[in-house]
Every structure is written in structure tokens, then in C-alpha cells.
């Protein structure tokens, strides 16, 4: 069960990375959205490190 949880976290992290990349490519990126995505990614990364 632990590996499925880790896989889900990794998938969520990858999805956030894609959203971050898309936001950064926009002509006028939303800085607050970028910060929010980065915080979410960091939270997931910390949870992965504790697994």
C-alpha cells in the first residue's frame, strides 16, 4: 500500500510540475499561482521524503 501512495504522490508532483511549466510559459504568468504551485510541490516533496 505504501508504494501506491508514493506513486500517487509522484504523479501529483508531476502534474504540478506540468502546471507550473505551463504557467511560466504564459505571456503574463500569475506570480501568486506560481507561488501556490511551488508550495504544493514542496509539501508533496516533504511527504515523499518522510515515506
Image: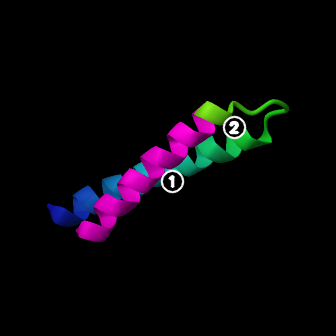
State whether residue 23 appears in this view: yes
| Front one among 7 and 26 | 26
Residue 4, image x, y percentages: 24, 59
Residue 39, image x, y percentages: 47, 46
Eyeballing the image, is 19 above or below 42?
above
Q: Residue at x 51, y 38 (%)?
A: 36
Residue 37, image x, y percentages: 53, 42
| Front one among 34 and 18 | 34
Q: What stretch is highlighted in magenta?
A: 33-51
Color style of the picture: rainbow
SS class, disc 1: helix
The secondary structure that dominates the magenta segment is helix
Q: What label does residue 47 carry, if any?
A: none
Eyeballing the image, is 35 above or below 43?
above
Disc 1 versus disc 2: distance between alpha carbons? 14 Å
Q: Which residue is drawn at 31% across and 69% down?
A: 49
Residue 25, image x, y percentages: 78, 41
State whether residue 11 appears in this view: no
Look at mark 2 in the image and give the residue it sits on: 23
SS class, disc 2: helix
Look at mark 1 in the image and give the residue it sits on: 14
Q: In which quarter of the image is the C terminus?
A: bottom left
Q: Does the magenta stretch include residue 43?
A: yes
Q: Is residue 1 magenta?
A: no
Disc 1 or 2, which lies upstream in sequence? Answer: 1
Question: Splitting the image into 4 quarters, where does residue 1 fall?
Answer: bottom left
On the rendered structure, is 37 left or right of 21? left
Eyeballing the image, is 24 above or below 11?
above
Q: Which residue is drawn at 39% across and 61% down?
A: 45
The answer to the question of whether label 1 and label 2 lie on touching residues, with beta carbons closer than 8 A, is no
| Front one among 13 and 7 | 13
Amino acid at each position: 500500500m505504501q508504494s501506491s501512495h508514493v506513486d500517487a504522490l509522484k504523479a501529483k508532483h508531476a502534474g504540478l510540475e506540468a502546471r507550473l511549466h505551463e504557467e511560466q510559459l504564459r505571456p503574463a504568468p500569475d506570480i501568486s499561482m506560481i507561488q501556490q504551485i511551488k508550495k504544493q510541490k514542496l509539501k508533496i516533496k516533504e511527504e515523499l521524503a518522510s515515506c
